[in-house]
């Protein structure tokens, strides 16, 4: 199966030799080819270039992209898209003045989602989750990281991870799985945090490893959830099972979690709404990707990750949705990119780099995803006819995507 896309107004994020990620000033550059073609064979990008070089190329399917932009699909490196039920009642509680912490203290929040999930069958959980997967694919997401963490018992965590594995098998979207057993302390371990950590480390992890259900390990490193010592235990346990860490950190408080993650070679540190100078300093020159989740800041009305300060300091930055029922019930990467430009003062070029190649790095798939590069997977967005790519973040809330190709398949 071959697809030839012709007359592309501008082909974006074209990188002959794509680096693993883009940092600092380089994020302001988005390499493009004007009036271009792109050739896909099966699941792979095989060629591209200026239109005048395409005259002798034949393909089974030709798509005329006159007036349209073509770019790699979004790489959403942080989601909790597998969950049961919704939390719109808490949403209204918050409108009426309750804080995130107050809702959690009332037995809401993550524990509420966990209770619902524990009582939902694996098939039902799969059916609810794939509706969201289909939605985000149509919105241009071609690779996605999905976390467990709404189970909080060995049985329910494994159920979540098996659903993720099934999605991986059944859909063309690239899926990476992260074990987030340490998302919150379950009620029955209320006064025995170490007991729960022991259960995660000694019971859940070996089984997950045996069934190869997770690529990464995660923990909610935050006041009232898990502290630095807990985080260290989880990172080290992950290492023993060959699961690098991706850490929820600095959402509400900065207390050394970033440094701990970097010291331990974490693949990413995610949230970072609260960043002090030391956090920025330790990230410099590291292999750890900082990940911002602006839809979460928007939904909770909390500060945005200080992207300007971080990029100006030379750091890379990735953008992801944090799609989850409590703090970000949206998996729309187009909204994330708009919000990053509007609220975090990222340029469109920085936001697109952050949502493609840097997102791919943050889930360990940068060799095959995140740019228009020969040999990479054919994961492609074709926009509607729009005046420029600035229009993508500018026209926030609008869907400017006409066609999505994932793994060489045209998604309806
Ligand atoms: Zn999250």
Image: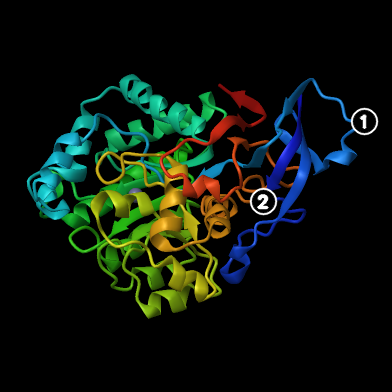
Lower sequence index among marks 1 and 2? 2
From mark 1 to mark 2, how far is it between C-alphas? 25 Å
Tell me what residue is drawn at x 62 percent, y 51 percent. 366
For the view shown, which residue lies furthest in the front direction? 387
Whether residue 107 sits left or right of residue 161 in the image: it is left
Crowdedness near tag 1: few (<14), some (14–19) or many (≥20) residues, C-alpha within 10 Å: few
- Assign a secondary structure to mark 2: loop
* Coordinates of residue 94 in the picture (x, y in percent): 14, 47
- Looking at the figure, which quarter contains the N terminus? top right
* Coordinates of residue 389 in the picture (x, y in percent): 59, 48
The residue labelled by disc 2 is 13
Tell me what residue is drawn at x 24 percent, y 60 percent. 226
Whether residue 168 sits left or right of residue 87 in the image: it is right
Q: Can residue 173 be seen in this view?
A: no
Whether residue 7 sits left or right of residue 121 in the image: it is right
Crowdedness near tag 2: few (<14), some (14–19) or many (≥20) residues, C-alpha within 10 Å: many
Tell me what residue is drawn at x 46 percent, y 59 percent. 268
Q: Is residue 226 above or below residue 115?
A: below
The residue labelled by disc 1 is 56
Tell me what residue is drawn at x 23 percent, y 32 percent. 86
């Amino acid at each position: 199966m071959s697809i030839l896309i012709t007359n592309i107004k501008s082909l974006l994020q074209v990188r002959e030799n794509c680096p693993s990620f883009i940092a600092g000033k380089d994020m302001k550059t988005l390499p493009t080819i004007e009036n271009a073609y792109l050739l896909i064979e099966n699941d792979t990008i095989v060629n591209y270039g200026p239109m005048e070089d395409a005259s002798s190329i034949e393909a089974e399917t030709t798509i005329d992209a006159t007036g349209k932009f073509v770019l790699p699909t979004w790489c959403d490196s942080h989601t909790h898209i597998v969950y049961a039920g919704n939390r719109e009642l808490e949403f209204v509680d918050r409108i009426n003045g309750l804080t995130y912490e107050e809702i959690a203290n009332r037995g809401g929040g993550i524990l509420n989602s966990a209770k619902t999930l524990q009582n939902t069958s694996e098939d039902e959980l799969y059916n609810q989750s794939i509706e969201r997967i289909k939605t985000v694919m149509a919105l241009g997401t071609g690779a996605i990281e999905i976390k467990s963490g709404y189970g909080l018992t060995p049985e329910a965590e494994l159920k979540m991870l098996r659903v993720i594995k099934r999605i991986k098998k059944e859909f063309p979207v690239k899926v990476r799985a992260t074990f987030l057993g340490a998302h919150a302390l379950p009620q029955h371990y209320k006064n025995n945090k170490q007991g729960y950590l022991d259960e995660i480390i000694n019971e859940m992890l070996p089984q997950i490893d045996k069934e190869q259900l997770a690529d990464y390990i995660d923990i909610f490193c935050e006041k009232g959830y898990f502290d630095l010592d807990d985080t260290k235990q989880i990172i080290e346990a992950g290492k023993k099972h060959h699961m690098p860490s991706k850490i929820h950190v600095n959402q509400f408080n900065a207390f050394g979690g970033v440094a701990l993650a970097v010291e331990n070679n974490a693949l990413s540190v995610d949230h970072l709404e609260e960043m002090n100078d030391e956090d920025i300093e330790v990230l410099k020159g590291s292999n750890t990707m900082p990940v911002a989740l602006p839809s979460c800041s928007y939904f909770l009305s909390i500060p945005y990750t200080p992207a300007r300060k971080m990029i100006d300091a030379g750091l890379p930055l990735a953008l992801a949705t944090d799609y989850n029922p409590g703090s970000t019930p949206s998996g729309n990467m187009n909204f994330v990119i708009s919000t990053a430009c509007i609220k975090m003062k990222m340029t469109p070029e920085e936001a697109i780099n952050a949502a493609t190649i840097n997102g791919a790095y943050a889930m360990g798939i940068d060799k095959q995803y995140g740019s228009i590069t020969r040999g990479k997977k054919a994961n492609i967005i074709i926009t509607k006819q729009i005046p420029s790519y600035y229009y993508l973040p500018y026209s926030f809330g609008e869907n400017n995507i006409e066609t999505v190709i994932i793994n060489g398949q045209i998604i309806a």
